[in-house]
Amino acid sequence: MRLFLFIFRWVCLPLVLIVLHLWSFGALYYSPIQPETLRNVIAFSYAAGIPLAFLLLRSRKWAVILPLAGFVCVLAYEWQIQPKTNAHYPPEVEKTAYAEFSGEKVTLYNIRNADYRTLKDLDVRWETREYDLNALRTLDVFANYWGMDAIAHVFLSFGFSDGRYLSVSVEYRPEVGESYGAFKGLFKQYELIYVWADERDIVRLRTNYRKEDVYLYRSILQPSQVRKFLLSMLERTNALHERPEFYNTVTQSCTNTLGDHIIRAKVFDIPFWKRRILTGSVDRRLYESRLLETWGRPFPELRVQSKINAKAHTADQDPDFSNKIRALFIKRA
């Protein structure tokens, strides 16, 4: 018992207080307070003020009270910050998708179908397409890496019996001139967006223009499960179209948000911590959970075969792009 109290008092509690203090500083530093000079003065004064006050007071009690009180005050301030609804967004995220339902038919508006010449030079078309839920057959998983094996972006593609594929990527929605930062993403810096897109857009953007590694896996979900998953994502898409929400690196990003949809659709039970961290191992974890079509291959071999960069470069503008990048599926099916 004494050991537990010692660890709690001198390790766990100080660590928690330090994390809360750093979060409070970040929330102030990235807050919408203007002008920027005033925001910086407030943030750095807060960062230095609480430790300084503790040193002057020389009390263990105040060492706990001051960071907690400061955290509560900053949290209350950040709580009232609302997502923007009229910001100036770049063309590729200018519009948000929404769906209308009529029986077994779904009409999806603002599906992105962009043609890229470079990352900055592109023509964006926003399309309206109709899908038959009865024709829904497959769910494919794309794991996207850009340098760090520990972190991956995951997006999905729903396959229909008529050969069409509908892709969706959960992303942050930057304003014009705004870049992504994982740390910034903790502090209400970006809105959340579900980008529904043509595969030639969303895949080629990553393989052919960003030069990132992309792996494509076929899930073993049955059409009824895929349907629940799709409906869950469309309902969330409609909610965000009506009422924007903030992106968050930990609670509302790409991979962990998809994990939440898996839970809502009752497809598979994923522990909370696995939905929030370890995104880089998502394909291995899906494999180990027996959610991927493996064709009897061990994971390392399946992963090598699932990399689609070369196929995407070869297919490029080919109207049969979706089938060309699925050569592994077609060969083995």
Image: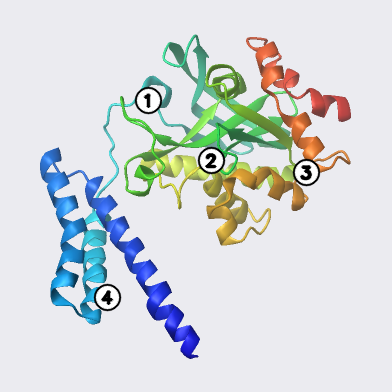
Q: Where is residue 284 shown, x and y percent of the image?
A: 71, 46
Residue with the mark numbered 1: 94
Counting other residues with Cα less than 10 Å from the Cα at mark 3, is it few (<14), some (14-19), or many (20 or more)? Answer: some
Residue depth check, mark 3 versus mark 2: number of the one nearer the observer: 3
Residue 69, image x and y in percent? 22, 70
SS for callout 2:
helix
For the residue labelled by badge 3, is the local secondary structure a helix, a strand or a loop? Answer: loop
Looking at the image, which is closer to me, 112 or 324? 324
Q: Secondary structure at mark 4?
A: helix
Looking at the rendered structure, the kind of residue marked 1 is Glu
Kind of residue sitting beneath label 4: Val
Mark 4, residue position:
64
Ranked by sequence position, the earlier of labels 1 and 2 is: 1
Instruction: Give the labeled residue for mark 2.
Output: 234
Task: Please state which of residues 74 and 264 is positioned toward the viewer in this rendering.
Answer: 74
Disc 3 to disc 2, C-alpha distance:
21 Å
Residue 270 seen: yes
Please report the residue visible at 75 percent of the width from the left and 28 percent of the height from the top: 161
Foreground of the two, 151 or 61: 61
Q: Quadrant of residue 211?
A: top right
Q: CA distance from mark 2 to mark 4?
A: 45 Å
Q: Give the residue drawn at x 78%, y 30%.
A: 305
Q: Between tags 3 and 4, which lies in front?
A: 4
Instruction: Give the Cα distance between marks 3 and 1.
Output: 34 Å
In this view, the mark in front (1 or 2): 1
